[in-house]
Amino acid sequence: MSSAPSHHLTAEEYLEIERKAPTKSELIHGRMYAMAGASRAHTKLVANIVRSLGNQLAGKDCDVYPQDLRLKVSETGMYTYPDLAVVCGEARFEDKNGDTLLNPAVIVEVLSDSTEAYDRGAKFLHYQRLPSLKAYVLVSQSEPRLECYTRSEHDWSYSQAHGVDSRLSLPAISCDLKLAEVYDRVQLEGSTKAP
């Protein structure tokens, strides 16, 4: 991520710039950061998860939103674009434009070398301030592995699924992610073939 304007932006200034911009940027503590493009593996992983969750949630009161829908963490003022968000019940948006989501139940982020520390650390701290968030899923691009932080009444618990024969349970939305489906036809970093 690279910094854009040097002065602190208000939410209104950011949204005015962002809604006209040809590329996506995040707003963190009043600073705007351009987002880099995604790799083929990253994009394929998101597409596979969208398909898997979309199929499981068909006919239910939940919607799956991939990469292009902006999310606001109201309590911290952060605006970002998660790789995938799931909303159950009525989706709430910041304003009448309907392009800034406020209430995800599940957020999925695909890890990369340049974003992994941020996704696990500062970004997750922002996400934890979302009262609606029940699960935060991290997806590896280097091996078939999914990690999940699940909100309980007082804390977050950690689980993971490792290997293409395993699955990750998401009780918050009554779904399972089968790693064989998530990593189907995905060429992992450092690998010469898809699992």
Image: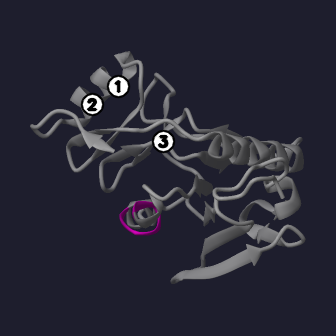
Q: Mark 1 to mark 3: distance in Å?
A: 12 Å
Sequence-wise first label, 3 or 2: 2
In which image quadrant can residue 195 be found?
bottom right
Which residue does the image show at 87% across and 42% down from the upper left? 58
In which image quadrant can residue 144 be found?
bottom right
Relative placement, left or right, of 193 versus 15 is: right
Residue 78 visible (yes or no): yes
Report x, y in % for residue 101. Answer: 51, 40
Residue 182 disc label: none
Report x, y in % for residue 166. Answer: 86, 73
Tell whether label 2 touches label 1 (CB within 8 Å): yes
Q: Which residues are magenta?
A: 118-122
Give the residue number, with chain letter if any, for mark 2. 14
Residue 18 disc label: 1
What amino acid is found at the position of numbered circle 3 in the picture? Answer: Tyr
Which of 65 and 133 lies nearest the eye of the viewer?
A: 65
Give the residue number, with chain letter if any, for mark 3. 81
Which residue does the image show at 22% across and 50% down from the upper left? 29
Relative placement, left or right, of 189 versus 113 is: right
